[in-house]
Image (cartoon, rainbow, N blue to C red):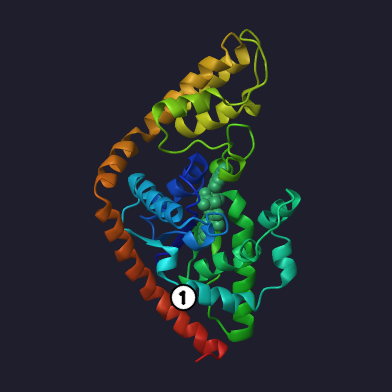
Amino acid sequence: MNAPRILSGIKPTGRPHLGNYFGMMQPAIAWQDRGQAFYFIADYHALTTVQDAAALRQHTRDAALDFLACGLDPSKAVLFRQSDVPEVTELAWLLTCLTPMPMLENCHAYKDHLARGKVPSHGLFAYPVLMAADILLYDSNVVPVGKDQKQHVEVTRDLAEKANRIFGPIFTVPQPSIVPEMATVIGLDGQKMSKSYGNTIGLFEEEKALKKKVMGIVTDSAPVEAPKNPEVSSIVALYRLVAGEADVGVMESEFRAGGVGYGEFKKRLFGAIWETFAPFRSTRAELAADPSTVEAVLADGAGRARAVADQTMARVRQAMGLR
Ligand code: TYM
């Protein structure tokens, strides 16, 4: 089999957090050695929430910097800005014409929005179609994502199969790739970590801010001496992501035995998060010192992404009877 084409994206709606890192960035970086990887900063998608030009540009640069600092190697993977290949919006329209409304009405991001009493924009409603266009434009085989994006990859598969039935084999049908232990990273309040819930831990928080957040993790009120259940603790869940097996084992048995308070466990968690990201922190500082490096990576990525996109669009327009 040929090397797989791997694709994923991150929305620049704020600084990336531990959920983004463990759910997508770390697995995506691991994939860069196993095939042709295309990763992008989804600025068109971010417009459903960020409607401030300066903020969007800043978040887009920051997300690219964070990805590079964490180990994305631009000599292996293509890193680009979604809006640098505007053909994706053309493909989104073509796919929209094949998309049944009920399929989108059933998508959980849209349903959550309604449940919270908000009025969804058409962009939010059609979000999964643009995401399908991202994936299909680059003939992707594998899409590394967190569990919250699984439904969107399923929509993509359905649309690709439908288009292939109607117009012939124009699209590659992708597979999601979800790492089970990292599928849903828990936030400070025990819910899924998410920018929209305000419960995130950023990858590159200042030391004091990071400590404050970790010390603020919500726990029950069990006293120091009481045995505690590690299986329901957000502290342990997060510690598993950043500490070695032996240290996790020690924390779990101390939970069960009692005699250690949540404050002590939180300090240990803080230390492990700080250590995990320390090497990336110094790389990030070096990269940030010269903004032209990131711009050059994105410009080069845009060219390489467009070369693939042009071929797909020529094939799709031809098959659909356009031009
Ligand atoms: P975004 O920016 O919300 O999230 C980026 C990636 O991080 C994962 N993630 C999590 N994983 C585990 N636990 C969490 N708490 C957590 N929070 C976020 C997400 O699952 C995601 O993989 N729609 C995408 C961006 C996108 C995209 C695409 C992705 C646009 N087009 C095409 C793949 C393919 C999104 O909202 O990402």
Residue 132 against residue 310 in the figure, above or below: above
Could you say where residue 82 lies in the image, as x and y percent from the top left? 44, 64
Label 1, ligand 1: CB separation under 8 Å: no
Quadrant location of the N terminus in the rendered image? bottom left
Residue 53 against residue 316 in the figure, above or below: above
**Disc 1 designates what residue?**
87
Any part of residue 177 in sight: no
* Left or right: 108, with 291 as reference point: right
Residue 139 against residue 313 in the figure, above or below: above
* Left or right: 107, with 289 as reference point: right
Q: Residue at x 73, y 61 (%)?
A: 106
- Indicate the secondary structure of the residue bearing disc 1: helix
| Mark 1 surroundings: few (<14), some (14-19) or many (≥20) residues within 10 A | some
* Left or right: 31, with 124 as reference point: left
Of 34 and 128, which appears nearest the observer? Answer: 128
Of 319 and 90, which appears nearest the observer? Answer: 90
Q: Residue at x 55, y 64 (%)?
A: 131
Residue 83: image quadrant is bottom left
Could you say where residue 96 lies in the image, as x and y percent from the top left? 63, 75
Q: Residue at x 47, y 58 (%)?
A: 8
* Left or right: 86, with 151 as reference point: left
Could you say where residue 143 lies in the image, as x and y percent from the top left? 51, 59
Residue 217 against residue 7 in the figure, above or below: above
Any part of residue 275 in sight: yes
Residue 176: image quadrant is bottom right
Of 185 and 11, which appears nearest the observer? Answer: 11
